[in-house]
Amino acid sequence: MRELQTQNLSRRQFLQIAGLGSATLALAACVAPGGAPVPAAEGGNNTATSENVVLHLQVNEEDEKSVAGMFKDKHNNVEFEFITVTGIDHEEVASKILAMLAAGQPLDLGYAATEATQLYAGQELAAKLDDWIIRDGGELQEYFDDVHPSLVEAMMWQGSLYQLPFDFNAANMYYNTALFKEAGFEHPAPDWSKDDFYAIAQAITKKNAAGETEIFGFGWTNRLWGSWTPWYFVNGGNILVEEQYPGGDWLWDAHYKDDPAAADRGGGWNWPGPKANSPEVVEALEFVQQLTQEGIAPAIELGGGSSLEGFFQSGKLGMIPAGGFWTGGLHNAGMAPDAFDVQLWPKWKSQRHQFGTANFFVVNTQNSTSMDLGWEYIKHRIQKESMEAHAWFNPVTRTTPARRSMNTAERYSLTGPAHWEVFYNTLDEHPDTAPIPAPPVSNPMTTAYTKYTGLAMSGEMTAQEAMDGLQKELEEIFARGV
């Protein structure tokens, strides 16, 4: 459904469509006229009507059912419809959601990662959370105390907050411990360099008599998150200009006033235009081209990289970018906790990492009662008790919890890796770490990004030619806007 990536809905069109699907979700008996929840009735039921209410959630039912069940214990007239949307990456999922909404399918809570946060906000499909957060700030303080401000800032746009981080993944470097040991290397130092990485990758790489690589030192996939993006981040570059939107003081002053990590944060990331052919980006692309040309890295594939996962698990791949999400995946594939480990991304000109974060957003149906119920579900979902019960964190950890207190030795004792603390240290020890570039035009931008990356890696273009082409196409995309 890539053809839907540039589809735009006017605000009026969307609200007409979404309003039709959500008209039956009125909850006048559940909320007070001002939107505040009615106190719980005797027996734990705070929905003082026997009328059933359907809340439409974009999430896999098996993953969400435990947390949804906990919510239903308090709102026993609420029923759930779970809508599963799959794709090779977050951009494809966003395209399908836009098409789904255009077709009139009701949705109350959509799910967005960083790749689509500003996309939905820019088209006014996602509702601002500001007023709810200000109203319920007291009960949310414990959550904000437990979540790094960089994750929160990544979900802001033009001074408003659209999502509360549930999980995140920074691009760290996973490695196969057996291949490291065979090549004579131990766990890298936290400040290991690009040159250290290159020497290790060379040593791990093994070729047969015909010169064909049988064990690769490094591998990556063609997408926005992970990919070769970490290399231009640590090289001091980005494919987009980086700025901050003004505003956000209403949040930072109220909830992060004494946190030095929140100093100088604003109203969200602003990427006003491209700089894809900057020297730092071109140099990073030339480096990953070199790795492939030398047989250190295999040919790239689009999306999630299932073949690379197989290479890594079978001892055919030494290193790969991945986040905390890979711990559960490797465990479920049969890898022992000590068969792999993780370290920060190697240092080049800097050691600035990139990450993505995610959670539900309230779909902007303009139905205040259904939107209020959606907000209540989000508040419920980010409670520590709810997160601990969620299938993504129980019994196997399948992504990095946004809550610092949930990143513990006990959590990773089942799956590994030994150096699990790297996941949150990426934020705590590197304050310049930032989200992947994902403006409101992120979908067509990503399509262009993967296209020119592919042309460079296939040898059809030099790194400079590919980034010049990407720059030109991105300039056209930004000129069209959303």
Image (spheres, helix red, strand yellow):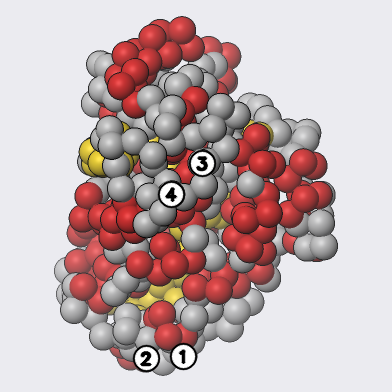
* Dot 3 amino acid type: Val
Q: CA distance from mark 4 to mark 3?
A: 8 Å
Residue 186, labelled with which disc?
Answer: 1
Q: Which mark is residue 181?
A: 2
Characterize the local packing of mark 3: few (<14), some (14-19) or many (20 or more) Cα atoms within 10 angstroms.
Answer: some
Q: Quarter-wise, where is residue 17 in the image?
A: top left
Instruction: Count up the numbered dots.
Output: 4
Image marks 4 and 3: residues in contact by CB distance under 8 Å: yes
Callout 2 environment at 10 Å: few (<14), some (14 to 19), or many (20+)? Answer: few
Give whichever of discs 1 and 3 has the lower sequence position: 3
Frontmost of labels 1 and 3 is 3
Position of 412 with respect to 207 (left or right) is right
Q: Are marks 2 and 1 in contact (CB under 8 Å)?
A: yes
* Mark 4 residue type: Ala
> Is 29 in front, or is 144?
29
Discs 4/2, front:
4
